Amino acid sequence: MSTMNDSEKPLLRPGRAGTWVAVLLAVTVLTWLVVGVATALGGWIGWLVAAVPIVVFIALPFSLYWLSEGRTGPSWVALIFTIALLVTAVAVPGDRYMRAVGTPVTATVSDVSCSYENRSGRCLYDYTLRGPDGRTLPGAFQDTVEYPPGSSLSVVADPRGVIAPRLAADLETTWIFDIATLVAFAGFAATAVLAAVLGERRRRELAATAGERTRVRKPGGGSGAKRGSGRKKRGR
């Protein structure tokens, strides 16, 4: 029987690191998309839906502690990339959707109100926009810049009315977030693979040590058999 103590037992079974890395990356991508879609919908309902995925997303890097067999370094490195991915999740999915299906519109501000004011007195304004045909564009357009009623804005509107209008100028610079997303995900994936390699090496070492101890302490070894045969000879 092996006498390994708890500190010498692997946190994961050897040979499963590749599977766990694949699962971790798949969950990361899926959670990122859920956060992006929920926040793109806007409003308190969208952020309420995104609350749980955000918590899960932030907790994902700490799974590298088990994957790397007790090393904390990979988790903290991965957390940096996770925070960057969380920032891009708020922007990229919604922006890519609007670039794909949105319609450029010259809208007119028909109504404006301050929905939130911070301590410095800066407002987050809610706008009601009307299209060239006079119809109200679906969705609440928000900005920290104040546009008086009657102002003309170049926006991209969602023909399905799912996502609120966005400034056309903002969508022209979203490629920066696209690149940031790719870099952050590549960094997260590389950290996970490195953690898996280090952890798998440690698990194999622990497994080899456990095997050696099992063989050494195995009952009924050769020395006992020799003593028994000696007793038989003397008995004759």
Image: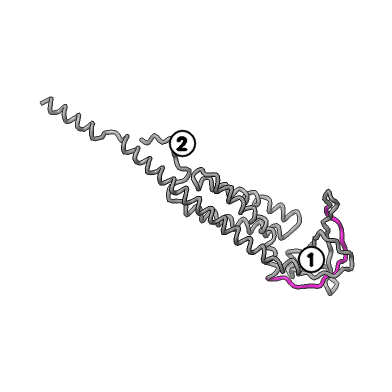
Q: Which residues are magenta?
A: 100-116
Identity of the residue furthest to the bottom in this view: 133
Q: Quadrant of residue 182 in the image?
A: bottom right
Amino acid at the residue labelled 1: Pro
Please state, as top left, top right, bottom left or bottom right, where the N terminus lies in the image.
top left
User: Quick check: is 159 in the magenta stretch?
Assistant: no
Q: How is the image coloured?
A: one colour
Q: Residue at x 63, y 57 (%)?
A: 32
Q: Considering only order in the chain, which callout, 2 or 1, is on the residue closer to the N terminus?
A: 2
Q: Quadrant of residue 39 in the image?
A: bottom right
At mark 2, the secondary structure is helix
Where is residue 14? Give x, y as percent.
43, 48
Q: Residue at x 39, y 43 (%)?
A: 207
Q: Residue at x 59, y 47 (%)?
A: 76
Direction from residue 61 to residue 231 in the image, left or right: left
Direction from residue 177 to residue 11 in the image, left or right: left
Q: Nearer the viewer, residue 130 or 180?
A: 180
Residue pointed to by mark 1: 138
- Say which of marks 1 and 2 sits in front: 2
Q: Quadrant of residue 147 in the image?
A: bottom right
Identity of the residue furthest to the left in this view: 236
Residue pointed to by mark 2: 6
Where is residue 191? Give x, y as percent.
54, 53
Q: Dot 2, how many residues are within 10 Å of its Cα: few (below 14), some (14-19), or many (20+)?
A: few
Direction from residue 135 to residue 212 in the image, left or right: left
Majority secondary structure of magenta residues: strand
On screen, 174 above or below 210? below
Amino acid at the residue labelled 2: Asp
